[in-house]
Image (cartoon, rainbow, N blue to C red):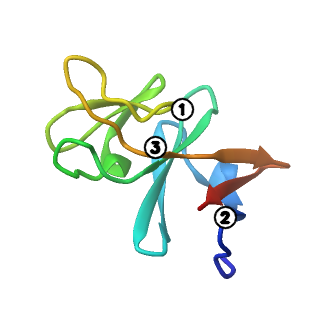
Amino acid sequence: MGAIMADAWIDIGAADDIPRLRAKKFRLGDETVAVFRTSADEYFALLDRCPHKGGPLSEGIVAGRTVACPLHGWVIALDSGEAVAPDEGCAPTLPLRLVEGRLHLRWP
């Protein structure tokens, strides 16, 4: 990956490098970003920390458009980062786009 420019789209690799129902981690600056792929080949990017206790969402179980945190089972919506009720909180999401089979992440 090249140099990180402020508020830029960054090519983070081939979409097919992320297995279905899994995530891949990327280190950007001081943050770790988890990029998820659903069974329907949808892709979502969230900061890799659960809003509950900071668990690594990238190691969670993906089902539909959600991921369950591996530490305490909180379920997080991949499209919004919001915890599913009755839990409350939000994992920050990042814009992601698919361009000719490659994933581009917008990094502030």
- Is residue 49 shown above or below 36? below
Is 17 or 97 nearer to us in this picture? 97
Return the x and y of residue 43 as percentages of the image width and height. Answer: 60, 39
Residue at the (26%, 43%) spot, across then down: 51
Which corner quadrant holds the N terminus? bottom right
The secondary structure type at the circle numbered 3 is strand
Q: Which residue bears the numbered disc 2?
A: 7
**Residue at the disc numbered 3:** 22
Task: Answer left or right for 16 relative to 30.
Answer: right
Pick whichever of labels 1 and 2 is earlier in the sequence.
2
Q: CA distance from mark 2 to mark 3?
A: 27 Å
Q: Dot 1 lies on which element?
A: loop
* Quadrant, the C terminus: bottom right
Q: Residue furthest right?
A: 100
In the rendering, at what x and y percent does residue 34 appear?
46, 53
Location of residue 18 in the rendering, given as x and y in whole percent from the top left corner: 57, 50
Work out how far the residue at label 1 is from the one at label 2, CA to CA, in angstroms.
26 Å
Mark 1 residue type:
Thr
Secondary structure type for disc 2: loop
Measure the C-alpha gap from mark 3 to mark 1.
Answer: 7 Å
In the image, residue 61 sits, relative to residue 108, either above or below, namely: above
In this view, the mark in front (2 or 3): 2
Q: Which amino acid, mark 3?
A: Arg
Residue drawn at 52 percent across, 31 percent down: 79
- Using the image as rendered, state which of residue 106 and residue 101 is in the foreground: 106
Q: Which disc is residue 38 wearing?
A: 1
Which residue appears farthest toward the bottom when viewing the image? 3
**Dot 2 or dot 3, earlier in sequence:** 2
Mark 1, Cα crowd under 10 Å, few <14 / some 14-19 / many 20+, is many
**Residue 107, relative to residue 95: is it above or below?**
below
